[in-house]
Image (cartoon, rainbow, N blue to C red):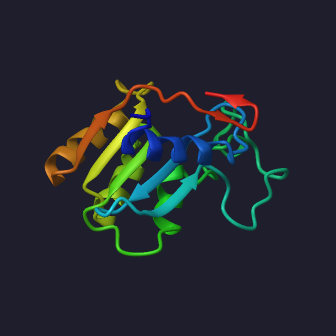
Amino acid sequence: MTKHISWDEYFMGVAILSSYRSKDPSTKVGACIVNEDKRIIGIGYNGFPFGCSDDEFPWGKEGKDLDTKYPYVVHAEPNAILNSTTSLKGSTLYVTLFPCNECAKLIIQSGIKHIIYMDDKYKDNDSNIASRRMFDAAGVTYKQMKKVNIIVGGYND
């Protein structure tokens, strides 16, 4: 019998691969949405909206709000939702970082029912506490997955 990766490892690997498209120097996040038939129906990563140059908008995290990335960056989850090819009802979201409260609202509204995430570095932030409250109220399940080791184009994550 040959060893192979699980479906969760496979789809999280796609999310990790997608994260490498992000130009954010400090936080690269990728997302992959999968339907109940184990078909990828959306992928995304964190970055600026179409038409907003990565060279003209700031990637910084400190300073006045308008001089940071925060008012401009579209998170990986909304990008994956917007890039989806079909209904997301009942689907599973694989994401490299637990979703913030703003993403949680979109996840719930889009019909995604399951979230599998890797990193939870903001677990105690109000934003992530609010996400968990909303997911619990809406019946969206979530579970953390151990880190997946894949090698991508010279990157080892």
Q: For this rendering, which residue is in front, 153 or 31?
A: 153
Q: Position of residue 141 (x, y in %)?
A: 22, 45
Picture coordinates of residue 147 (x, y %)?
46, 26
User: Is residue 5 shown above or below 74?
Assistant: above
Residue at position x 36%, y 31% in the image: 145
Tally the marks: 0
As drawn, is 134 to the left or to the right of 57? left
Residue 86: percent from left, percent from top: 41, 75
User: Picture coordinates of residue 17 (x, y %)?
Assistant: 61, 44
In the foreground, 105 or 112: 112
Q: Residue furthest front?
A: 1
Residue drawn at point x = 76 percent, y = 44 percent = 58
Residue lying farthest bottom? 86
144 to 49, vertically: above or below: above
Left or right of 123 in this view: 44: right
On the image, which quarter does residue 36 sit in? bottom left
Residue plotted at (30% across, 42% down): 131
